[in-house]
Image (cartoon, rainbow, N blue to C red):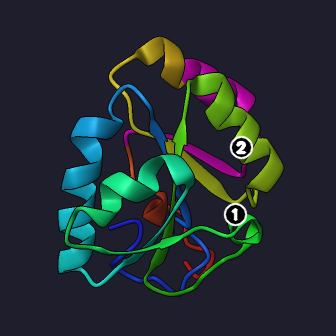
Amino acid sequence: NAKTQRPSTCNTVETLLVNKNIADSFLPVLSKQMAESGVTLHADATALTQLQAGPAKVVAVKAEEYDDEFLSLDLNVKIVSDLDDAIAHIREHGTQHSDSILTRDMRNAQRFVNEVDSSAVYVNASTRFTDGGQ
């Protein structure tokens, strides 16, 4: 629901960073779910071909889109090599509003919480819990 429940709010996910180790199994599931919700995926070069094979509408991401708030049913998808790569991307392009990690590795979760400089940092939870209107 971090993208589709209320896509025009400031706590809506704009970029999904996917670890390369799960991309092959995760991207087809993502494509199906996002197609069902009418989300357009803006994919990096690594994810583009695989996502284009699925049912979702997919376009190539433009570099400047990593800094945009779409406020719509559009979602960037970027493959990252590891947690360092993900944190570096967030530091460069994040809004410092809310960020979340979905993981089974609690060491990675703790490191994410410690190193991501956002008002709200979540582990295995939706960024939708942070709403400035509440």
Residue 67 appears in which quarter of the rendering? Answer: bottom right
Secondary structure of the residue carrying tag 2 is helix
Residue shown at the point (43%, 83%) measured from the top left: 73
Q: Is residue 83 left or right of residue 19?
A: right
Which range of residues does the magenta coloring cover?
Answer: 110-124
Residue 61 highlighted magenta (yes or no) = no
Q: Amino acid at mark 1?
A: Tyr
Q: Nearer the viewer, residue 97 or 68?
A: 68
Image quarter of the C terminus: bottom right
Residue 111 highlighted magenta (yes or no) = yes
Residue 131 appears in which quarter of the rendering? Answer: bottom right
Question: Circle 2: is it few (<14), some (14-19), or many (20+) Cα within 10 Å?
Answer: some
Residue shown at the point (62%, 36%) measured from the top left: 86
Above or below for 21 versus 130? above
Q: Amino acid at mark 2?
A: His
Q: Position of residue 101 (x, y in %)?
A: 48, 38
Spatial CA distance of label 2 from label 1 is 9 Å
Question: Circle 1: is it few (<14), some (14-19), or many (20+) Cα within 10 Å?
Answer: many
Residue shown at the point (43%, 16%) measured from the top left: 106
Task: Determine contact: label 2, label 1, CB under 8 Å.
Answer: yes
Name the residue carrying label 2.
89
Residue shown at the point (26%, 43%) measured from the top left: 26
Q: Position of residue 18 (x, y in %)?
A: 45, 41
The disc placed on residue 16 is: none
In this view, the residue farthest toward the right is 92
Q: Nearer the viewer, residue 74 or 129?
A: 74
Q: Is residue 27 left or right of residue 116?
A: left
Secondary structure of the residue carrying tag 1 is helix
Name the residue carrying label 1.
66
Q: Is residue 66 left or right of residue 8?
A: right
Q: Position of residue 34 (x, y in %)?
A: 27, 71
Image quarter of the N terminus: bottom left
